[in-house]
Image (cartoon, grey):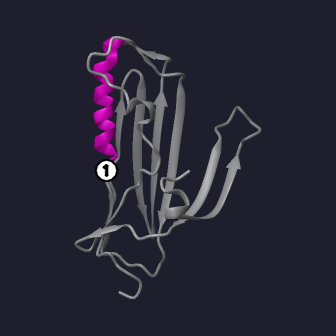
């Protein structure tokens, strides 16, 4: 499920909840350990918290000159929650999380929220797609949405001091 799969992550545990109840959201819980260290530059570790594809079907659309509505398929709500933890033997001078952000358009609403805790960062991403078709008149709003999501997902969690075990 994660980008890079087994090459980048070691699966510790997983569970799938609510398979038998269509009235509640499906919940997939995956616990993994990254096999390689996050990118480091000038004593700062950069971690991309956007492990799941955020733009989905909108990313590949060619909008300039488009004369037909965009098929949104069906209304949907997706939420991804990540909890990033690190071994207590790591120490950092500080940890910076991206700012919370959101965007609300007639056809879609998205939000991302971060919370810094002792030894962990929690991240929550949600997207609610509304409707079935996006009229041609709303294609500019779709492009604005795409630019907003690209801006939001270009932000990293930064670990300053890049403390290695024993340092």
Q: Which residues are magenta?
A: 136-154
Q: Nearer the viewer, residue 29 or 34?
A: 34
Viewer-proximal residue among 145 and 119: 145
Residue at 51% from the left image edge and 63% from the top image edge = 7
Let me know if residue 144 is in the magenta part. yes
Q: Residue placed at 28% from the left, 42% from the top?
A: 151
Magenta part mainly helix, strand or loop?
Answer: helix
Residue 132 horizontal/vertical position (percent): 50, 17
Out of 120 and 10, give the one closest to the viewer: 10
Query: Pointer 1: what residue?
Result: 99
For residue 2, side relative to residue 135 (left or right)? right
- Where residue 65 appears, as percent x and y from the top left, is 27, 16
- The residue that appears at 30% across and 48% down in the rendered structure is 154
Note whether 31 is above or below 127 in the view shown: below
What count of labels does the image hold?
A: 1
**Label 1 crowd bin: few (<14), some (14–19), many (20+), radius 10 Å:** few
| The furthest residue to the left | 42
47 relative to 128, above or below: below
């Amino acid at each position: 499920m994660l980008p890079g799969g087994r090459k980048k992550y070691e699966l510790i545990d997983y569970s799938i909840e609510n398979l038998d109840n269509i009235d509640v959201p499906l919940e997939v819980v995956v616990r993994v350990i990254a096999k390689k260290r996050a990118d480091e530059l000038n004593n700062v570790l950069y971690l991309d918290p956007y492990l799941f594809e955020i733009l989905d079907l909108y990313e590949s659309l060619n909008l300039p000159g488009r004369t037909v509505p965009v098929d949104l398929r069906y209304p949907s709500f997706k939420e991804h929650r990540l909890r990033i933890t690190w071994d207590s033997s790591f120490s950092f001078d500080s940890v910076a999380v991206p700012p919370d952000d959101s965007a609300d358009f007639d056809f879609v609403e998205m939000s991302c929220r971060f919370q810094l805790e002792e030894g962990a960062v929690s991240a929550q991403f949600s997207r609610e797609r509304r409707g079935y078709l996006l009229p041609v008149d709303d294609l500019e709003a779709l492009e604005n949405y795409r630019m907003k999501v690209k801006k939001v997902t270009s932000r990293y969690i930064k670990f300053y001091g890049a403390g290695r075990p024993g340092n």
